Image (cartoon, rainbow, N blue to C red):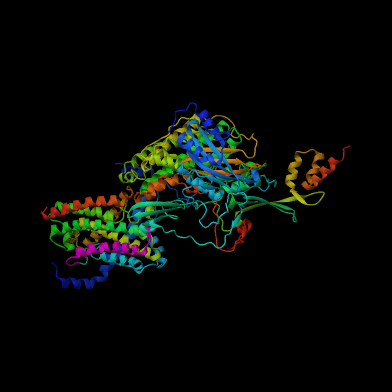
Amino acid sequence: MGRLGFIKDYLRYGVVTEKYPYEPVPTPETFRGKPVIDSSKCLGCGACVNACPANALSIEDDLRGGIRWVRLFIGRCIYCGRCADACPVGAIELSREFELSALESKDLIQEVGLRMVKCVICGKPFTTYRLVREVMRELSPDERVLTLVCPECRAKLTAVNTSFARW
Amino acid sequence: MMDAAPLLNVLIKYWLPFIAINVVIPALLAPLLDGIERRVRARIQCRRGPPILQTWYDLVKLFRKGAVTGGPIIFRLAPYIAFTVSILTLSLIPTLLNASLSFLGDTIVFMYLLAVPSVIISIGSIYTGSPLASVGSCREVSLWMAYELVFALSVATLAIDRSSLLLRNILPPYPPLHPSTILAIAIIAFLTYAEGGRLPYEIPEAEPELAGGIVLEYGGAELGLVKYALLVKRITLSTLLIDLILPRTWLTSILRSKMWFLGIGQVVVSATYISLLVILSITYSAIEALYGRLRLDQALSVLKKSVIIAGVAVLAALMGY
Amino acid sequence: MQHSWVTNGCRELVDLLSRYGSVEEVGNAYLVKVRAEDLPEVANELQWGLGGYYSTSVGADFRPIDGTYKLYHIFSVPQCSRYVVTQASLPPSLPKAPSITPVIPGANWGEREVRDMVGIEFEGHPEPKRLVLPHNWPEGIHPLRKDFPYDRKLIIEGVDDEVEHVDELARKYQVVPIGPYHPALHEPEYFELYVDGEVVVEARYKGFMVHRGIEKVAESRMTLNQVPFIAERICGICGFTHSCCYCQAVESALRIEVPERAKYVRTILLEIERIHSHLLWMGVALHVLGFDTGFMAYWRIREPVMRLAEELTGNRKTYGANVVGGVRWDIREDHVEKALRILRRVREECVALTEKVLKIKEVVSRMKGVGYLSREDARRICVVGPTARASGLDIDVRRDHPYAAYGELDFRVPVRDEGDVLARFLVRYEEVLESVSIVEQALQNLPKTPLINEDYEVVPLRIGVGATEAPRGEDVHLVVTGLGNKVYRWRPRAPSYNNIPATLYMLKGAYLADAPIIIASIDPCFSCTDHCLVIDVRSGSSRFVSFRELVRGGYRG
């Protein structure tokens, strides 16, 4: 009879459920869990912020203190990994953690604070030291000084330079 | 035929231990049996299942909420009536002890009381006006009428065969054992399974269809009482089946004559009763795990056939078989 | 159904369409610009004259671009593997078009949603009631218009609570509500059943309770490559097919060539999704019938498939694999071995289990002859997927409009003509076996090419149609690319959208006890269907509350 086959199945397979949460459950190595920002590598470039579909990553510039805050709020994260794809230096990677509940929402925030560089012309902080150092590596010595000029001042300089003939 | 006066004396002297052992203990056991059934069903489904005490935990949780159900007074009272009557029914049938309240016509009273919990809950549910509860209630009434007819015919078979309406006389030992008796017991075995609300006959509650149907509108302590009443009904039905098969009085007297302990016979019979209860629960649960739910019209058609078989049993008993 | 011109197929189709307007070939579709007045005639020709299948209707607010509203109707013409998109431009002063519902009853919901969301009126529509928006939503405010902000909460003043429409039916018969919260349903929706004893006399449906504003969000703030991730979250089971469908629509619009390996990976993941979705459904159907042991057994078999998906993509269900132009995850050699082993076992166990289940009389008797949908009704309502194939309609997007790698793989499309719940069960069962075979073929023939083609230009305002065979049926996405790497209009039409109206036909005359299994038999995915926005309506003074205020908890309401 078809029915008794189910008892046979039980005798063959036994109990198939796991005792989670009383015993841990393994995740495969490819598992996409909580993203973790490595604060020693982060440049503050914002590529991850642009890529994130869920607006979980954000950048806030504290102009008075001169610090750029890169913030990851796990509450909005969808664990897609686009931030890891976008990061030029591999500072953000998806770990295998998935038990992420917290009692306070501030425990769901990862923050990296990066010191900002002041524009040599107008004095406004506009980028981070790390990013400037990274960019300088690709440039020749005389181009490097331009990296210390903020975009508005650079635009003004370019306008000035092009309206006068070069020597 | 026992004289009423000495019986009453005995009862008045021993009423407290009788109730404690024969009524209260089985009532306390009923949720444990349900726990066993849930665990067995879970294992057959290849999962662990809740601990055996789980049904007790669930009932305690509900009772702790207090009386929360509102609505018409019949609806609110029904759980209390159902629970009380179901406990009362246990006193009419031997459970752990071979003793029970016994008087002329107690068989009929027993059947009556057995039916009261379902009926009163059905009536209460209709008063709520909730459509799902009403449908559950109608289903329960249809099924109940079918069950009672088959039940009455089977018990009638036994009564006719033994020429007595005293429950004591209908119970084993059966010298001589007639085919009509065997047939009647077989039918009652099917009824004790089905009337306990087990699949494929779990129709009035039918959670995926009616969201709980007949018990839908209850909450808190009232829900606990309704569930408890149904659990006590189950243990009563299982007890009836066991009592129809287990020759208590014969066993007790044999053991007493072979052993010098005056009480050992009863203890062994009590232990056998409990073991049979557990075995029956495990068996019923294993069967239930292998079945889906029938639709009301399908269930009624099965019961119609049972009526015919029960009718045959009655005829056989009348003819002396 | 006329198949007489299969060989000349496309030529005759183009000729027919040219009679009504200019025809442009867009990927796998013909875009034909017609006049609004001709719509019923065109619809009639395509659906009944040619034997095509109506898919859905889309409305779009093009006023910022060229000052018109656009109305699209999408048809599938399997005979020449093409979709036909009719585009009618409507002036904003008079956004009206003749309804095609009298010609094709299946267009009922599509047109009502266009009316709710964009505000185009349909003359001659037999049931011009609100479909998506709540009944007390004010007139004249249409969420998918471009002047409606996506990040503000709309407060409407002075509206009454739901008015009970007590008609003669409710007076004569008992009303049994299934929903919005009911154990038989996995998402909130509302089936109102009018019963006489245990028999259902009439059924009404009210849904769209889980609108989430997906189309609006995508059109407002998402880039082209962010949309696949929200598309994946339209459904809790069949997310990957939505993201594939979207990507295909964009790839069709921008003429992007997807590398071969990416097509194969998409195929493999799509079929894995189909396997787990069908096994889930078979378990749920048994649960609704009261047979929990069978339910547990199917889900036990399904579990290794979920773990396989987790190992291949990093997540059991949201694979996150698609980007426009290809896929992000590759399938490694060692994974191929493992997958083949797991699928072999799934096939064996599924066959053994289904044989056991089909021998269980009370389960089969509650599926046989229950929930009958005739072939004619199925065609008129335009149902799709296993629901259609169980009623004798031989349609399957994988074979009719080959996408991903299906054109190169060998598979059968199971079709039955009993039209009852048992037929749908058996169609899905056979599809599981076919899917296993497809994945095996694909895994053993993975071509060695790159995974993503990023060499494309985003041209604004190009239209594209993507279509996939989701586990529940034909999934169609219409995309109009936007300015600056964004999406101007995106309409995902999930298969359940076309299938849910069929339940109302099936429920009439059925036993009440059979209602849950009938509703479950179309494998409804209400999350898929309700993916647009519902905004809370409160009585109070009318003002806009900014999203920031809401997020910071400033709004106490």
Q: Give whichever of B273, C74 is nearer the camera.
A: C74
The answer to whether residue C204 of the structure is visible from this angle is yes
Give above or below for C378 relative to C166.
Answer: above
Q: Give whichever of A48, C412 is nearer the camera.
A: C412
Residue C493 is situated, as x and y percent measured from the top left of the image, at: 51, 43
The residue sitting at the left extreme is B319
The answer to whether residue A15 of the structure is visible from this angle is no
Give above or below for C238 relative to C512.
Answer: above
The image quadrant that residue C259 belongs to is: top right
Q: Residue at x 47, y 28 (%)?
A: C6
| C486 in magenta | no
The image quadrant that residue A133 belongs to is: top right
The prevailing secondary structure element of the residues shown in magenta is helix
Residue B131 is situated, as x and y percent measured from the top left of the image, at: 37, 59
Residue C223 is situated, as x and y percent measured from the top left of the image, at: 63, 44
Give above or below for B64 relative to C33.
Answer: below
Q: Give whichever of C193, C316 is nearer the camera.
A: C193
| B111 in magenta | yes
Write down the region rendered in magenta: B102-131
Q: Is residue C555 left or right of residue A157?
A: left
The residue sitting at the right extreme is A167
Q: Is residue C492 left or right of residue B39?
A: right
